[in-house]
Amino acid sequence: MFEALVKDKPGARVALKSLSPEDQPVLITRPEFLRRMKEMQSLQGMPGNDFLESYNVVVNTNHPLLAQKLLKVKKEKDRQELAVYLYQLALLHQNMLKGAELTSFIQRSQTMIK
């Protein structure tokens, strides 16, 4: 399900890991070397490369939200919406959610609160 979310994103890879149940349900990690290279390029005024946008989407298989809620949702549409929401939360945590995706995330969050 999460692989379908990132298949169009260049440099994104999904990894399933058994982390602590207290950790986030979905995490975004970046290779340290590539992050530093991108920072150095931006400081020098060089245009960024797509390969520097590489990141991992780590799905915490031990998190109760995934283990108890996501897997038990009956409708595929509802399951997909929850997966998208968790993925976008992880992007937001890393300041990677921008533009139209950020706007739709905020609107969806506001409708969930009502």
Image (cartoon, rainbow, N blue to C red):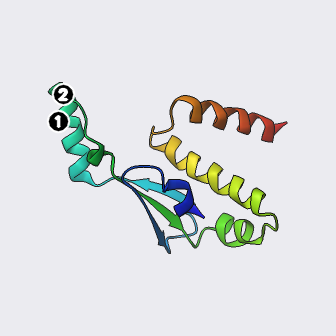
Question: Looking at the image, is 31 positioned above or below residue 39?
Answer: below
Question: Looking at the image, is 78 positioned above or below residue 34?
Answer: below
Q: Nearer the viewer, residue 114 or 100?
A: 100
Q: Are marks 2 and 1 in contact (CB under 8 Å)?
A: yes
* Picture residue at 50% right of the left edge, 75% below the top: 18
- In this rendering, would 97 be left or right of 81? left
Residue 63 lies, in percent from the top left, at: 61, 68
* Picture residue at 56% right of the left edge, 60% below the top: 4
To which quarter of the image does residue 26 belong?
A: bottom right
Label 2, residues with CA under 10 Å away: few <14, some 14-19, many ≥20: few
* Picture residue at 58% right of the left edge, 69% below the top: 21
Q: What amino acid is at disc 2?
A: Leu
Q: What amino acid is at disc 1?
A: Met
Q: Which of 47 and 19 is in front in this view?
A: 47
Q: SS for tag 2?
A: helix
Residue 24 lies, in percent from the top left, at: 55, 58
Q: Nearer the viewer, residue 51 or 45?
A: 51
- Separation of disc 2 and disc 1 at Cα? 5 Å
Quadrant of the snapshot with the N terminus:
bottom right
Observer able to see residue 24: no
To which quarter of the image does residue 56 belong?
A: bottom left
Q: Residue 43 carries which label?
A: 2
Label 1, residues with CA under 10 Å away: few <14, some 14-19, many ≥20: few
Q: Which mark is residue 40?
A: 1
Observer able to see residue 85: yes
* Picture residue at 48% right of the left edge, 56% below the top: 7
Residue 12 lies, in percent from the top left, at: 41, 55
Q: Nearer the viewer, residue 84 or 9?
A: 9
Residue 84 lies, in percent from the top left, at: 63, 51
